[in-house]
Image (cartoon, rainbow, N blue to C red):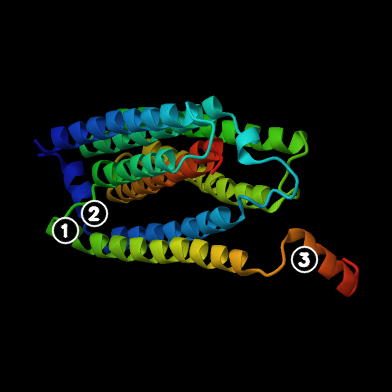
Amino acid sequence: MDKTIDLVENTEKTKTYIGFWIYIMTDCVLFASLFAVYAVLHHNTNGGPSGQSLFSMPYALAETLILLTSSFTSGLSMIAARNNHKNKVIFWLAITFLLGASFLYLELHEFNHLVQIGDSWRVSGFLSSYFTLVGTHGLHITVGLLWMAIISLVVIKRGLTKGTIKGLTLLNIFWHFLDVIWIFIFSVVYLMGHIGL
Amino acid sequence: MKKDNRLTNYAIGYATCILLTLIAYLIASLNYYRNWAIIATIATLALIQFVIQIVFFLHLSKEKKDRWRLYVFISMILVVLILVIGSIWIMNNLDSNMMLDQKQSNLYLKSQDGL
């Protein structure tokens, strides 16, 4: 019935979609190696602080819920695209962008706080691996936000065409993937760090 | 028909993930010491949430159109498991087979080249 629903379904059959999926899977391997580094180094505090004394649990929970919600609203924008509601797409993308930006703000705020109190990546192997792991995730979020801003402008200008639908579909799975990675950062770094693993 | 299905999927996925996150958070925040049962529980909750997000958000299924994505996904899981478990295993093994402890090895290094 709707044309855009076919565009979405067709995008999901293209080689671009499979290719982008393969890229995301290799990015998972990148994060896995950073997790492995963290797992190996997180006891090496070199006399500095451990995760247990450093991380604020409610803060990490807030970050998690914000990112989870942004993943959900990103999905809602995709559903709006399937139903050919251009304004709803823009609306949900804007909400996703705001949530993503507040997540990034919280993360940078935490980094800044850690550096200010003298616990930067130079202090210990634990903090180096922590900053690398969480920082790489933050870098992906930054790229995702830029991409989202650009694609919103293009959708406003050109509407829901074959090209913009393709971009939206890829951005959507990229954004979901970032939330998937965050589950493990939240569980391994913050929750298990709190217990003192 | 199809669009409603997706919306329901997203809502179910979102609600379940929030619930799992909160349960894991509560379990962790009520415990301050290292306890393997708690750690296993948190890991299990994370894995359940992982599967839920893959199925409900990334729409990975066993359907024919998703077959290739599934194969790539399974290969990724395999590589990730080898990488993470292998690293932890090897590094722990190296660590526990070091003949000198931290203090002794520092002394040794100092005697060798004035660390």
The picture places residue B15, in percent across and down from the top left corner, at: 28, 28
Q: Which residue is mark 3?
A: B105
| Residue name at image x 22 percent, y 39 percent | A82
Q: Amino acid at mark 1?
A: Lys
Quarter of the figure with the N terminus of chain A: top left
Secondary structure found at label 3: helix
**Measured Cα–Cα span from mark 1 to mark 2:** 8 Å
Secondary structure found at label 1: helix
Report crowding for label 2: few under 14, some 14 to 19, many 20 or more residues within 10 A (C-alpha). Answer: some
Residue B65: which quarter of the image? bottom left
Front-most of residues A10 and A62: A62
Going from the N terminus, do you reach mark 1 or mark 3 first? 1
Q: Which residue is mark 1?
A: B65
- Which chain does the residue under circle 3 lie in? B
- Which chain does the residue under circle 2 lie in? A
> Which of the labelled discs sits on residue A189, or is there none?
none
For the residues labelled 1 and 3, say whether their Cβ atoms are less than 8 Å apart.
no
**Foreground: disc 1 or disc 3:** 3
Q: Which residue is mark 2?
A: A12
